[in-house]
Amino acid sequence: MLMDGKQVFDALAREEQPPTAVDVNHAIAAGRAMRRRHRAAVAGITAAGTVAAVVAAWTVGPWPGQRDAGADRVPAAPSATATPRPTYKGFAELKKKYPPKGKIASVPPLVMWLSDGPRKNGLFLCESGPNGSSCSAFPPLAANEFARRQGRLHGKGVWFGISKDVVHGMTAVTKDGKKFPGNLARSVGAGLGVWAVEYPSGADVRKLVFIGAKGEVLQRIPL
């Protein structure tokens, strides 16, 4: 006799099943213990994170009454930048025509350099300034000559010239003894330096005084 599916299931349901080997009560107890351990672990992690945050805040923050160390920090000063050499009218053309023999010196209010002249041992003194740029030849300095005035800017109180390297300074002196220190650059080229001195318009300058390393007077040039 053939049985349909429903009859088969009904027959199986009426049969007595063998006892299970699983301890249900033990499984329930184990599950509860596992859930308790999980909750404890989560709580421990949360508490540890909170403590770490508190410790970090206490460590980083200043103590009560203590100033923040950053308040005393002075910002670094900007690095100083070199003042560019002034470029006057005709400077580039003159430098190309009369190449520097040595270095180009900034001797306010002029830019000056030496260049080889057409004659043997002859030199040009080139200057570039507010009145333009020019070069002029000069013969070598004599043995007893420490400096020489080469020219004066038209319409301005500026004298300029050359000097031997033993000269360390120069000053323009007026009739009543007032002094105007000049600017001097040593070792520009060919064992010579260059100088320039500027004084107020109307000042009665009568002489130029050149001194050595110890302040001794080497030469006076009357004007």
Image (cartoon, rainbow, N blue to C red):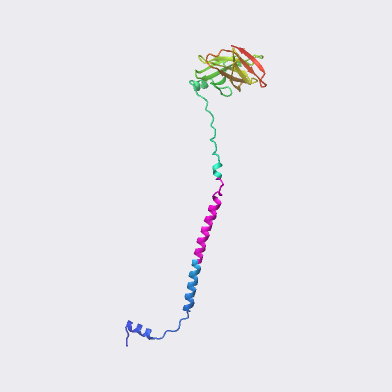
Q: Whole-percent x and y of residue 41?
A: 51, 65
Tell me the quarter of the picture where residue 223 sits: top right
Is residue 175 depicted above or below 18 in this figure? above
Rendered residue at 37%/84% (across/down): 13
Q: Whole-percent x and y of residue 114?
A: 57, 20
Magenta stretch, residue numbers:
40-67
Does any portion of residue 119 appear in the rendered image?
no
Which is more toward the observer, 104 or 190?
Answer: 104
Is residue 113 depicted above or below 8 in this figure? above
Characterize the magenta stretch by its predominant secondary structure. helix
Q: Residue furthest bottom?
A: 1
Rendered residue at 51%/61% (across/down): 47
185 falls in the magenta region = no
Which is more toward the observer, 27 or 148?
Answer: 27
Image check: 101 left or right of 144?
Answer: left
Q: Whole-percent x and y of residue 210?
A: 63, 17
Q: Residue furthest front?
A: 65
Quadrant containing the N terminus in the rendered view: bottom left
Image check: 139 left or right of 9?
Answer: right
Tell me the quarter of the picture where residue 173 sits: top right
Does any portion of residue 163 appear in the rendered image?
yes
63 falls in the magenta region = yes
* Figure label count: 0
Q: Whole-percent x and y of residue 59?
A: 56, 52
Tell me the quarter of the picture where residue 2 sits: bottom left
